[in-house]
Image (cartoon, helix red, strand yellow):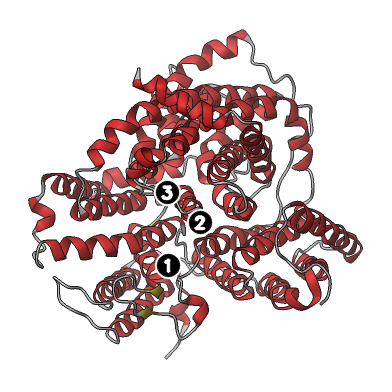
Amino acid sequence: MELISHLGIGLEAVLTWQNLGYCFLGVLLGTLIGVLPGLGPVATIAMLLPVTYGLPPLSALIMLAGIYYGAQYGGSTTAILVNLPGESSSVVTCLDGYAMARQGRAGVALGIAALGSFFAGTVATLVIAAAALPLAEFALKFGPAEYFSLMLLGLIAAVVLAQGDVFKAIAMVVAGLILGLVGTDVSSGAERFTFGMPELADGISFVVLSMGLFGIAEIMINLERGSGRDVFSTRIGSLLPKREDLRQSVKPILRGTALGSLLGILPGGGAVLSSFSAYTLEKRIARDPSRFGKGAIEGVAGPEAANNAGAQTSFIPLLVMGLPSNAVMALMVGAMMIHGIVPGPQVMEERPALFWGLIVSMWIGNLFLVLLNMPLIGLWARLLKVPYRLLYPVILLFCCVGVYSINNSAFDVGLTLFFGMLGYLFVKLNCEPAPLLLGFVLGPMMEENLRRAMLLARGNALVFFERPISLTLLIASALLLCVLAWPKARKARDLAFQEN
Amino acid sequence: MSLSFLKHRDVAAGLLFLLTGVVVAAGACQYPLGSAMRMGAGYFPLLLGGFLAILGAAVLLRAFFSRQKHLVERLMLKPMLLIGAGVLAFAGLLGSIGLAAASFLLIALSGLAHQESRMRELLPLGLAMALFGAGVFVWGLGLPLPLLPA
């Protein structure tokens, strides 16, 4: 019953006209930007982050969470209507969603995606509310050694999830850790790798790095590949699934929700892992797997439920331990810091209204998502028909205004351009940028915890193996590495990514 | 010696990582290293730089022994230059010419990077976005940006 009283605290905090308004606005803006091809949740949140600076902390977080769900759903819309995944978590939605659109059932695919996401979001909200307290108590047992091992596990998980070559993915993680070093060293006050530039003394801003790697680089790739987009011109059709569609989707949605809620909690997990696993699962247990890729509604319902559940439960490591498990959560850390909130187990104790308010707002955000998208879907489809040659200058302008307004700094905009060029080069060299971003965020925390652990252990590195929780985490990391080295498992992983 | 081996994707990637790792490790040695118990500012960077160099060397070696040789795709210079010019003009001039004019410049310059770009589309778009930026960013969101030339 503690659960209900906690949710009560949250409801009380959220149910003001102001907060509901920001939640609605967040979902609306998130969907609007997320629908644009080539803009995933990371770029969308980074772009809209400055909008929330002036708000009170809870309103800002509510709005950001709304932006996140909106961007996620916007990505699915683009995937279904034009076969272009805005981000990697809607890659699998393209497969059957676009096939359904070609059969004139785009509306049903969009409808089932919205309903599945809403159901998954509701369940995942309850999972977070129920799991937060016990997990936070568990997290209090964590010392620096445990935190270090946990972050190591998260980074290795990110490598497993990256597409392509394992060596290069690990190198990208390390490169990210190194970029995280730039700026003033917290313990000694020494300025590291700033090349004498005062603008770098506070380190590289996360928004600058992610806008460069995911915003500008993406534009250049799209320009090069040409806009082979082909918007589905026939009518979208009825959004409401028929009884038969619902019957076929209920079980995939339930399975997707369970899988997504579980996988989202893992460090390095989140929406991407969840949607891929859900698709693979549905295909494997289907009576007739050959229907997949040709418009099977299960192939939309399962992954869409899973990616929303995973997107939501990936808040757990952040809220409970202060550890971001993916790039979006890293942005949320940045946003919380700006409002003077240090994410971690203490937030629940010290600011219960904020903590439970955020959790309740997740459900409300999902509700708005359904209410908003059902009537507005025609508008989103029309937005997709705007030619890319007119769209990308506007996207670029938003990126630049967003970056400039963080510190009113022209230097930051130039640095963003630099990372954009670097990101373009990485794509040319077949190196995926997502692991780099996670390394960048975890870098400073890893160094800090490594230092503290070694200080407490008087320089004895064995401390990481002597403490049971840390040892367990390290064994899990080692197992993951073994899985990567094992040729058969590697083939399965590559296959899963090549499904499209 | 021919430099054509640099065009291989993994050779280029490996070299990039190897060189970055070496530079970082060398840079880290400029800072106090400390001991394993009391790590100085250079300790962790030295570890990371060394590790990156080793990974780079591994990617490089494997590329030499691998039978598959993927070449680096050509970099498209025109979009890079035009987008770069637009962004730099925006960043450099925003303080002096104001948001409206800087937005217009960014759209007009970067918009040319598309193969099918047309000036008669870009000019009205730039004008519209200059007005939109003024309305939304400065009046709507209250971002502290100069709107008109100082």
Q: Are marks 1 and 3 in contact (CB under 8 Å)?
A: no
Q: Position of residue B132 (x, y in %)?
A: 82, 55
Amino acid found under the numbered disc labelled 1: Lys
Return the residue at label 2: A338
Disc 2 with disc 1 on a shared chain = no
Tell me, for residue A326, which label it has, or none: 3
Give percent across and percent down for residue A407.
59, 68
Helix, strand or loop for disc 1:
loop
Q: Quadrant of residue A124?
A: top left
Q: In terms of secondary structure, where does tag 3 sit?
A: loop
User: Can residue A307 be seen in this snapshot?
Assistant: no
Q: Between tags 2 and 1, which lies in front? A: 2
Secondary structure beneath label 2: helix
Asked if disc 2 and disc 1 are in contact, CB closer than 8 Å, the reply is no
Mark pair 3, 2: CA separation: 19 Å
Mark 1 surroundings within 10 Å by alpha-carbon count, few (fewer than 14), some (14 through 19), many (20 or more): some
